[in-house]
Amino acid sequence: MTGEATARGPARVNLIGEHTDYNGGLALPFPIDVGVTVRAEAISGDEVVAVATDLGEEDRFALRDVPAAEGWRAFVRGTVAELRAAGFAVRPARLEIAGNAPRGGGLSSSAALEVALALALLALSGEADAVDRVALAKLCSRVENAWVGAQTGLLDQLAALVGRPGCALRIDFATLDLRPIPLELRGHRLVVLDSGATHDLSAGEGYNERRAECERAAAELGVRWLAEADPAATARLPDPLDRRAEHVLTEDARVDETIAALEVGDLAAVGALLDASHASLRDLYDASVPEVEATRERLLEARALGARMMGGGFGGGVLALFPPTAEPPAEAVQVEPGLPARLLP
């Protein structure tokens, strides 16, 4: 037990495997160096006081019977409530929250906030080192689902908590088998370029609607996970459920195809798989917007080997792979695997 603690939650980039997590499929994300930092200080009383320094806003609530809220406050209150519900000893605390991951940019600043909050609060009670990180990812996902209203899967939280430097993380969401994959780019660069169109995954349209469609498709096919469906059977589904299922099944295959290409150093094939993923997200999943398409075209015109929308879609950033001989647009940000969520000295 300590009087203060600071935790850093990383944002993440998902190389490939989009909208597969809540369908029992595969993905290949990695944590990056930008993210959210939470400094927690134990205080007397029975309250949690949270300050979002970037916004100049404060929240204050009792530890017992935590009420619902909206915006960034929902993440704080939900994390406290879920930790207590799981049996952790959350102490009264003052929390200072600061970050450098763009909100709504497809880098999952939300998961970065959740895991930083959880680790900082657990450190105050002396429980951070002993906690199982996969279990903590599930807890943080409940915050997002039940308190924030975004029906996301476990991709972002697992990437933030279990990722490794220099590697992408192959996640099988049906079994939660986790396997680090060395991300050796041989002089190539992965970059992200913001489209300027922000997205809100807690909004009813878009992300949550797609998840509901996938659940209906799985129910009609009689499978637990849509990723388990027989590709031949999906043709019997009505539109758009047939297209949603086709995206999930083909995207799943692209994850392992990307790993195979990385293992033999075929970066041109990785670029082609990024293009195929984008086309599937655009045409089968209806997850693109004009700003994303224009941003992708800019990256391709700059001679990217491939580019695709990233995150939940409906806005956010575009990920692109550039060869050593090409120069990305000046505003593009290079990304590479960094450290997972951790306590800071």
Image: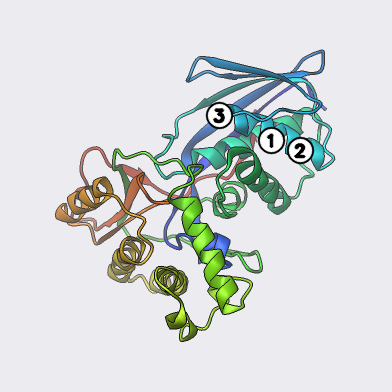
Q: Where is residue 187, by image quadrant?
A: bottom left
Residue identified by numbered label 2:
83
Above or below for 307 versus 126:
below
Residue at the farthest left position: 301
How many numbered callouts? 3
- Identified by mark 2, the residue type is Leu
Left or right of 21? Residue 305 is left
- Do the residues under discs 2 and 1 have CB atoms within 8 angstroms? yes
Above or below for 100 versus 135:
above
Q: Position of residue 138 (x, y in %)?
A: 68, 51
Residue identified by numbered label 1:
79
What's the mark number on residue 218? none
User: How far separated are the C-alphas under marks 3 and 1?
Assistant: 11 Å
> Dot 1: within a 10 Å radius of its alpha carbon, few (fewer than 14), some, or many (20 or more) residues?
many
Q: Residue at x 74, y 28 (%)?
A: 66
Q: Which mark is first along the chain, 1 or 3?
A: 3
User: How far separated are the C-alphas under marks 2 and 3?
Assistant: 17 Å
Above or below for 306 versus 107:
below
What's the mark number on residue 72? 3
Mark 2 lies on a secondary structure that is helix
> Dot 3: within a 10 Å radius of its alpha carbon, few (fewer than 14), some, or many (20 or more) residues?
some
Q: Is residue 90 visible?
A: yes
Q: Where is residue 131, by image quadrant?
A: top right
Q: Residue at x 36, y 70 (%)?
A: 265
Q: Residue at x 55, y 51 (%)?
A: 152
- Identified by mark 1, the residue type is Thr
Q: Position of residue 244 (x, y in %)?
A: 43, 68
Q: Position of residue 49 (x, y in %)?
A: 68, 17
Here the colouring is: rainbow
Mark 1 lies on a secondary structure that is helix
Left or right of 168? Residue 87 is right
